[in-house]
Amino acid sequence: MPWFGRVGGGTLIGPPSVSIKDCLSMAAENWNRKTWALAGPVILSNISTPLLGAVDTAVVGHLPGPHFLGAVAVGALIFNVVYHGCNFLRMGTTGLTAQSLGARDADEVRAWLARAGLLAVAIGVFLIAVQIPVLWASLEVIDPGPKVRPLTDAYFSIRIWGAPMAMLNFALLGWFFGIQNTRAALATQVFMNGVNIVLDLTFVIGLGWGVEGVAWATLISEAGAVGLGLWLVARNLKRVGGHLHRERIIDGGRLMRMVRVNGDILIRSLCLQTAFVIVTAIGARMGDTILAANAVLLNFQMFTSYALDGFANAAEALTGEAVGARNRGRFRRAVKATSLWALVFSVAFCAFYLAAGVLIVDILTGVPEVRETAYAFLPWVQFLPLVSVWSFQLDGIFIGATWTAEMRNAMAASLAVFATVVYILTPEMGNHGLWLAFTLFMGFRALTLGAFYPRLESRVGEPA
């Protein structure tokens, strides 16, 4: 079976002649193997994302004038905010599909893909329909300079037509994660980012299309990824089995469940984005140097999340399957295996940041005053992986179990605590107070979800 056509995973059963200790060792090895089979491709695909951003910056950064780079940065920011809010299409689809896989309900595995696809297209078409007010409001809030604004308009007006494709990519990724085929997800993401990079170089440097070339490269690569994704879906559907029933797809109860899950995740994502907006806004009030230094330091958190998200995605798939199978023992083993590897990687990130943190800052910025300021606050991000890892993992576990209301409530409570701490500490502690508040925010996310976890585990195996 081709590597991109595998679905799910089996369980390892030792022969009767081996000892209980050997059986336990073999079972642990199997769960570690399953964790890496799911997390490894996600980590590899995530690596291509910052690479694409670097190429976008490099090709536009060589055009005659900073306004070209500013236009792409502003345009990309608008899409990042809008699309991140729609990431529920990925996360919700993963949990719901994984549970149907665990329940061995092939018809429902197919139906969740169809429902997610229909919702994705509807959202994409809606974004195209409201593109004028979205662009106007975004430019009013960001208020770019007179040279940047028309270029941002051109970038946005081209790329927005790829919105249905971008939404479909979210849905396809979620379904691939749900059926535990992260290699198919890796194939689509690497293909999309690879095509984007090649077209960036061709359109911008080769043909001289400028900012419009970057937008066209992104649009075409998103469409290509959907084409590849649908081809991989067709291959996987043969192995999933079952049939697609129209009346099941539009079943009111199941549609309402999808709306509820996705709505909770949407609110949770908006709260998370609000926290990052607060960090940026408060930093900006402290001056351009603090703002720039914080932007550099936030890259450390971004790099960490790209890697640790692989284990969170593995937790989504494996715990979701266990919940669908109503198997509490399998659920616990999935939580233990994915969390252990995530912890190992978080320790490795801390060690790497302690050893190379200054070098990373120097690579990210060449401005002396920004470097010196970043050095002063570097310890906060050097130890942040040990705090962040638990919120990432618990997010994955709760998404797999589709306990999204608890995720929503935990994130809202964490945001309230974060805003309060920022208000109290930053007047006296300045940027140190801001970073302390952000660290507490990541920790409180884990604490609030951790408080719900015992009840979640105790409910696994009970009738739905």
Image: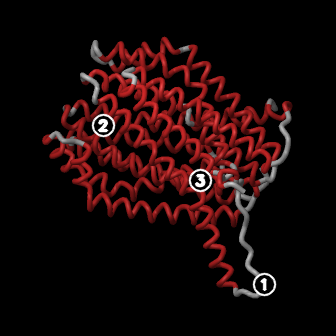
Residue depicted at x 36% and y 22%? 208
State the separation of the CA atoms marked 3 and 1.
33 Å
Q: Check contact, mark 1 vs mark 2: CB within 8 A.
A: no
Q: Are marks 3 and 1 in contact (CB under 8 Å)?
A: no
| Label 1 vs 2, first from the N-terminus | 1
Report crowding for label 1: few under 14, some 14 to 19, many 20 or more residues within 10 A (C-alpha): few
Labelled disc at residue 423: 2
List the residue tagged with mark 3. 397
Q: Is residue 154 above or below residue 295?
A: above
Nearer the observer: mark 2 or 3; the answer is 3
Q: Which structural element holds mark 1? A: loop
**Residue at 47 percent of width and 28 percent of height:** 217
Could you tell me which residue is drawn at 57 percent across and 38 percent down? 265
| Disc 1 from disc 2: Cα separation | 63 Å
On the rendered image, what quadrant is the N terminus found in?
Answer: bottom right
Q: What number is the disc on residue 422?
A: none
Q: Which secondary structure, mark 2?
A: helix
Q: Identity of the amino acid at label 3?
A: Ile
Image quarter of residue 370: top left
Disc 2 versus disc 3: distance between alpha carbons? Answer: 32 Å
Given residues 164 and 280, the one toward you in this image is: 164
Residue 169 is situated, as x and y percent measured from the top left of the image, at 60, 35
Judge whether 199 appears above or below 104 on screen.
above
User: Can residue 447 be seen from the camera position used here?
Assistant: no
- 245 sits to left or right of 184: right
Q: Amino acid at mark 2?
A: Tyr
Which residue bears the numbered disc 1?
Answer: 16
Where residue 101 appears, x then y in whole percent? 75, 51
